[in-house]
Amino acid sequence: MMNTIEITDLHRHFTVGDETVHALDGVSFSIAPGEFVSIMGTSGSGKSTLLNLLGCLDTPTSGTYRLDGEDVQLMNDNQLADIRNRKIGFVFQSYNLLPRTTALENVELPLFYNRHVSPRERTRRAKDALCLVGLESRMQHTSAQLSGGQQQRVAIARALVNDPVLILADEATGNLDTRTSYEIMALFQDLHAQGKTIAFVTHEPDISALTTRIIRLRDGHIVEDNANTPLSAQQILQTL
């Protein structure tokens, strides 16, 4: 079976002031379809760089990077934008919703760039995605009318609407309280159980303990890459 992500000997160095940051120093790993992987770094800069590479937002200095069998390094800017939209669903720490539009309109947004999807189909898919994350009664609410946890559910629905090969979450519980964080992680675990491939960037051991594999970076190198028996977010919620 073809890996969703195949990264080989990636190097990425960049300069911050007078310092050279070795964000990636010969990193190699793959993520198979259906995996739920947490990626942990020891510094914000290293974590962000890895997130950019995983999200096809940058080009590594050297090495190879393939997403769903396609070589990202051979792509121009337009091709990179297209593959981001079609194959990756992004979920950010700060939600990144349009503030004066409804939940439904926010979820529809990625489909506006897909010329093969009609307006009727776009709305149907967005409604289905919102129902999947439990927001069928909040479709016409704007971001200001939603709690932080509800806004993140909208963001997850938006990430799902194009049926991507990878959901890439960047500290997706970082702005949430403890209970809401576990509610969101329970949703991610449900999506994983349905076969979704998820890469979850986090600095929180409690969050990585809910995933099935943990990759840990330090000084640009992978220092841990182990399978994990995940705790159940739903069971933890019952104790709170």
Image (cartoon, grey):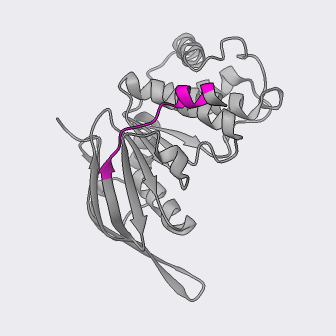
The range drawn in magenta is: 226-238
- What residue is rendered at 70% in x and 28% in y? 150
Left or right: 54 in relation to 26:
right
Residue 171: horizontal and vertical position, in percent? 58, 48
As for residue 61 lying within the magenta part, the answer is no
As for residue 237 lying within the magenta part, the answer is yes
- The residue lying toward the viewer, choosing from 155 and 118, is 155
Q: Can see residue 162?
A: no
Left or right: 217 in relation to 16:
left
Residue extending farthest to the right is 145
Residue 4: horizontal and vertical position, in percent? 29, 41
Q: Does 72 sit above or below residue 109? A: below
Residue extending farthest to the left is 1
- What residue is rendered at 50% in x and 67% in y? 42
Left or right: 98 in relation to 119:
right
- What residue is rendered at 57% in x and 31% in y? 236
Check the picture and name the quadrant holding the N terminus.
top left
- The residue lying toward the viewer, choosing from 240 and 116, is 240
User: In the picture, residue 141 is in which quadrant?
Assistant: top right
Q: Does 229 sit above or below residue 103? A: below
Residue extending farthest to the front is 239
Q: Does 44 sit above or below residue 40? A: below
- What residue is rendered at 47% in x and 47% in y? 208
- The residue lying toward the viewer, choosing from 29 and 17, is 29
Check the picture and name the quadrant holding the C terminus.
top right
